[in-house]
Image (spheres, rainbow, N blue to C red):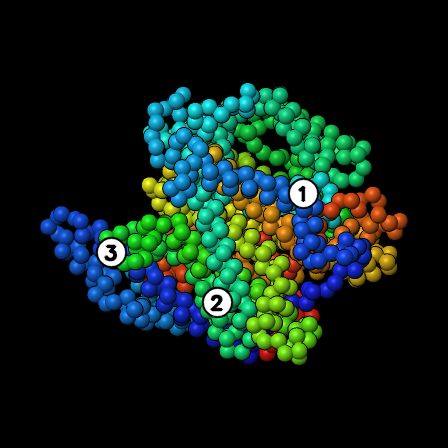
């Protein structure tokens, strides 16, 4: 194993060396960094040219300049050496600083999108595989193909137009007329009826319930101006929490496990009580506090499960912990909604909350919640644009993997020995279907750091992709190299992790030592 | 290496015996399956329609087309440039897709853009397919040093960002005065040069797949038999192994092509692909996105054509994969659970069934998250 890793790392180092040399030459060959001065009629022309030549060491030919750059870059490998030097960009800023800023921007942009795409994609993939040939399956498959075919810049511009400008106009006077509410209800009802499965009667019933619910809620929201002062309140949290408790128990333990269901329900009750106790504390919230509270909620859930006891303590603990965490999330959501009016009327926002460019409103003042809402409204559109790209591939891949697993003999064995369908799907099939997906997730996380060039361009986020594109536009090799090195190293490391993870998860696959 | 995944396990439960293959050659089976895939047939029809319309309407390579305008021609604004076509009553009008601000006909521009996209797609498909097969075959068949060198080469190329190459090419093509043969070629045939460049980097994933196919096929008995009966390496490769690997090849070339369209439009959008005065679908969107509020049609029609071309190619690829995949059986999940047998579902043969091949990863997204 160690030999294998060592061999992979040595190969990777050589590949990186070759590729980086090539990339450096290409960037240097892509144009003339002095071009903007050459046509400059001012008398300082020569000085400007000399200054930039000095800064970028243009007097050294590119094939040799690479080695000067390489000499600085190698020092980054010395741990705690603090002498990392990736050169300077065309404006004289050290690349290491620029990379740090860009990395933060990129990760905030891409992380949420990737996590959501993975969660939704895997769920959709599993459901469509279990309902092969259903209307839902055909619908999701078509959607996946459509998403593959949508150019992201086109989607991004549409999102800006309808998601930001249109939605902001709506928020100015948030009124849902009755026909619109009925229309949305009909659409969602049809979607539910298609997705529900089972006999026609059951589908129609589910669709009708959803239609009535959505239409009523929208009319209620419109009448009470909910969109201006949103909030959940303890009642909604309690009702939603009970729903969550049932769903979590159904998936993680099965509804027959009474102890698990009871623990989950108790966790909901505790959560509703905590809702009232936490409000004053949440007014002083910091990021660390939210993390600690999340951990606290999980621990409370586990504690409830543990105290419920019974012969199958683990399942109760798991169900209660997940439920408790989700209820905590609802409380967090409610607190954010409470901060919405103050964000909405902020002098910097002026009633147009959904932003089309940047990562935050410049010079915004406010507490933790207002700032959180600010980054949320800035992130939502790029996140939607990014999700649609990766969602399709996760859905297709999970579906394929799940279908293959459901064909296996051990699934037939599991059914034959009388296990419930839930156990077969969740415990025998789902876990094995995740193995190939784990490697793809590792690849994608490795690729995260490269940023999303087009999304960053359209939404003016100054992340890694922007740095890269900007470097190319100004024929500036150092930022390009900085981004390239970061991306290549993470990609290679995560490639290795993916291979190792595969062999760890699937005992049939062994790495050659 | 860990990539020898152990997922090549024949499916068992709920699989019907293959009766459809009786007395037919492989080509006939593939054709029959492909024609039975309604999504692929619709995709093929849509693509053929767009192809014919794009290449005949505004003319190609100096041959004049049947449409009265060209993409560069300025004509007086009709109806303030709004589209004149309508569905009911069905009418074509003077400018069916409308006009831009200075009066160029959007239909002509979109058709020209579609020509460019399709040209690039085909060039990339041909070059990537050819290089991928050659490199993959040599590496997978001969192994040893050839494999080590070629695979390290693919490792190097796969991490070089396409965006950078396109930018370099765009710069080189921009310098017409330099007089090198490449600059003059690139400036006169911008699209072809871009296609060739992109083709030169997109063969790597195909090469890896083909190597995998060759690695497993060269160990099979029929290859041993051919070798014992005195066949040369070339004969084994071309006559025995390649026909068995052609399914994977065609499917993945199709998917590379659908990804290539998105790559081309994305590069043109970023300003390093096709450049004005020529036009492409991505460039049209990039030029007109500011005018969305006033002239939305300038934005809708080119985007719609990108989506249509790409979607039809994806469906064709899906149909081809199902047609070529020998593991594709009519699997019915309900029947596997239900001991009473098929519940009237057996007729539903479309390509959406059956697990994908393990080598297949649905086309890479056009955004930078993965490729660049």
- Residue behind mark 1: B38
Image: B368 above or below A82: above
Query: Disc 2 on helix, strand or loop?
Result: helix
3 or 1: tag closer to the N-terminus: 1
Left or right, A36 with respect to B50, comes to left
Dot 3 or dot 2: first in sequence order is 2
**Residue depicted at x 61% and y 46%:** B315
Q: Which residue is mark 3?
A: B178
Label 1: chain letter: B
Residue at 51%, 27% in the rendered image: A170
Outermost left residue: A43
- Disc 3, SS: helix
Q: Nearer the viewer, mark 3 or mark 2?
A: 3
Q: Residues within 10 Å of mark 1 (few under 14, many from 20)?
A: some
Residue at mark 1 to residue at mark 2: CA–CA distance = 38 Å
Q: Is residue A62 above or below residue A157?
A: below
State how far apart marks 3 and 1 are (Cα).
52 Å
CA–CA distance in space, label 3 to label 2: 33 Å
Query: Are the residues flagged by discs 3 and 1 from a single subunit?
Result: yes
B185 sits to left or right of A219: left
Chain where mark 3 sits: B
Please tell me which residue is depicted at 67% across the width and 56% down the height of the picture: B27
- Foreground residue among B314 and A61: B314
Q: Compared with residue A476, is residue A194 higher up or lower down, i.e. above or below?
A: above
Q: Are marks 3 and 1 in contact (CB under 8 Å)?
A: no
Are labels 3 and 2 assigned to the same chain? yes
Image quarter in which the C terminus of chain A is found: bottom right
Residue under label 2, please give it.
B155
Image quadrant containing the N terminus of chain A = bottom right
Q: Residues within 10 Å of mark 3 (few under 14, many from 20)?
A: few
């Amino acid at each position: 194993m160690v030999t294998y890793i060592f061999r992979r790392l040595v190969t990777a180092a050589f590949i990186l060396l070759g590729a980086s040399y090539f990339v450096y030459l290409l960037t240097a060959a892509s144009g003339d960094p002095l071009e903007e001065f050459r046509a400059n009629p001012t008398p300082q022309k020569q000085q400007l040219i000399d200054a930039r030549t000095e800064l970028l060491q243009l007097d050294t030919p590119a094939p040799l300049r690479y080695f000067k750059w390489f000499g600085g870059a190698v020092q980054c490998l010395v741990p705690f050496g603090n002498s990392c030097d990736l050169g300077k960009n065309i404006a004289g800023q050290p690349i290491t600083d620029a990379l740090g800023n860009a990395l933060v921007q990129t990760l905030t942009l891409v992380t949420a999108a990737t996590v959501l795409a993975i969660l939704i994609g895997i769920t959709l993939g599993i459901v469509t595989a279990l309902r092969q040939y259903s209307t839902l399956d055909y619908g999701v498959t078509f959607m996946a193909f459509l998403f593959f075919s949508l150019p992201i810049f086109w989607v991004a511009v549409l999102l800006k137009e309808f998601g930001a400008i249109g939605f902001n106009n709506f928020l100015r006077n948030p009124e849902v007329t009755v026909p619109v509410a009925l229309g949305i209800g009909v659409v969602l009802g049809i979607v539910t009826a298609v997705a529900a499965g089972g006999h026609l009667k059951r589908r129609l019933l589910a669709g009708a319930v959803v239609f009535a619910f959505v239409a009523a809620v929208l009319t209620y929201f419109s009448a009470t101006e909910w969109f201006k002062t949103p909030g959940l309140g303890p009642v909604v949290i309690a009702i939603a929490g009970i729903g969550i408790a049932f769903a979590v128990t159904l998936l993680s333990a099965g509804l027959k496990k009474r102890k698990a269901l009871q623990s989950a329900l108790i966790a909901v009750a505790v959560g509703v009580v905590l809702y009232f106790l936490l409000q004053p504390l949440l007014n002083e919230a910091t990021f660390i506090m939210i993390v600690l509270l999340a951990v606290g909620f999980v621990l409370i859930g586990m504690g409830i499960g543990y105290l419920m006891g019974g012969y199958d303590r683990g399942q109760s603990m798991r169900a209660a912990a997940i439920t408790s965490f989700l209820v905590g999330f609802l409380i967090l959501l409610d607190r954010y909604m409470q901060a919405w009016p103050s964000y909405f009327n902020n002098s910097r926002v002026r009633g147009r909350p959904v932003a089309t460019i940047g990562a935050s409103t410049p010079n915004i003042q406010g507490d933790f919640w207002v700032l959180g809402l600010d980054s949320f409204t800035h992130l939502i559109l790029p996140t939607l644009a990014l999700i649609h790209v990766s969602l399709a591939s996760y859905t297709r891949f999970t579906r394929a993997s799940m279908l293959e697993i459901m064909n296996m003999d051990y699934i037939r064995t599991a059914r034959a020995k009388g296990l419930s369908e839930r156990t077969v799907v969740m415990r025998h099939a789902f876990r094995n279907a995740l193995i190939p997906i784990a490697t793809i997730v590792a690849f994608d996380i490795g690729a995260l750091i490269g940023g999303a060039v087009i999304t960053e361009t359209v939404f003016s986020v100054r992340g890694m992709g922007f740095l890269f594109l900007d470097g190319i536009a100004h024929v500036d090799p150092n930022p390009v190299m900085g981004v390239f090195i970061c991306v290549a190293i993470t990609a290679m490391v995560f490639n290795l992790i993916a291979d190792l993870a595969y062999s760890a998860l699937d005992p049939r696959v062994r790495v050659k030592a | 290496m860990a990539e020898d995944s152990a997922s090549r396990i024949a499916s068992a439960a709920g699989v019907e015996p293959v009766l459809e293959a009786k007395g037919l050659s492989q080509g006939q089976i593939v054709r029959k399956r492909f024609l039975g895939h309604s999504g692929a047939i619709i995709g093929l029809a849509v693509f053929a329609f767009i192809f014919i319309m794009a290449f005949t309407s505004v003319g190609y390579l100096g041959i004049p087309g049947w449409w009265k305008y060209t993409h560069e021609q300025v004509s007086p604004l009709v109806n303030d440039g709004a589209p004149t076509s309508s569905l009911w009553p069905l009418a074509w009008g003077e400018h069916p897709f409308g006009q831009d601000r200075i009066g160029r006909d959007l239909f002509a521009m979109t058709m020209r853009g579609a020509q460019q996209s399709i040209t690039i797609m085909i060039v990339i498909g041909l070059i990537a397919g050819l290089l991928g097969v050659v490199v993959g075959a040599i590496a997978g068949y001969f192994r040893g040093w050839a494999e080590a060198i070629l695979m390290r080469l693919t490792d190097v190329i796969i991490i070089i960002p396409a965006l950078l190459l396109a930018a370099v090419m765009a710069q080189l093509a921009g310098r017409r005065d330099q007089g090198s043969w490449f600059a003059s070629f690139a400036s006169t045939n911008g699209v072809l040069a871009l296609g060739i460049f992109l083709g030169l980097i997109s063969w790597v994933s195909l090469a890896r797949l083909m190597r995998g196919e060759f690695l497993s096929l060269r160990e099979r008995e029929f290859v041993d038999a051919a070798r014992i009966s005195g066949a040369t390496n070339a004969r084994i490769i071309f006559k025995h192994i390649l026909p068995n690997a052609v399914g994977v090849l065609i499917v993945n070339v199709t998917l590379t092509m659908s990804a290539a369209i998105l790559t081309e439009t994305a590069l043109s959008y970023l300003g390093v692909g096709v450049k004005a005065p020529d036009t492409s679908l991505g460039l049209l969107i990039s030029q007109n996105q500011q005018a969305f509020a006033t002239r939305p049609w300038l934005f809708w029609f080119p985007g719609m054509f990108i989506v249509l071309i790409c979607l039809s190619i994806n469906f064709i690829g899906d149909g081809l994969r199902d047609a070529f995949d020998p593991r594709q059986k009519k699997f019915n999940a309900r029947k596997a659970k239900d001991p009473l047998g098929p519940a009237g579902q057996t007729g539903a043969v479309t390509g959406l069934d059956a697990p994908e091949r393990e080598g297949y990863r649905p086309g890479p997204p056009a955004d930078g998250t993965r490729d660049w």
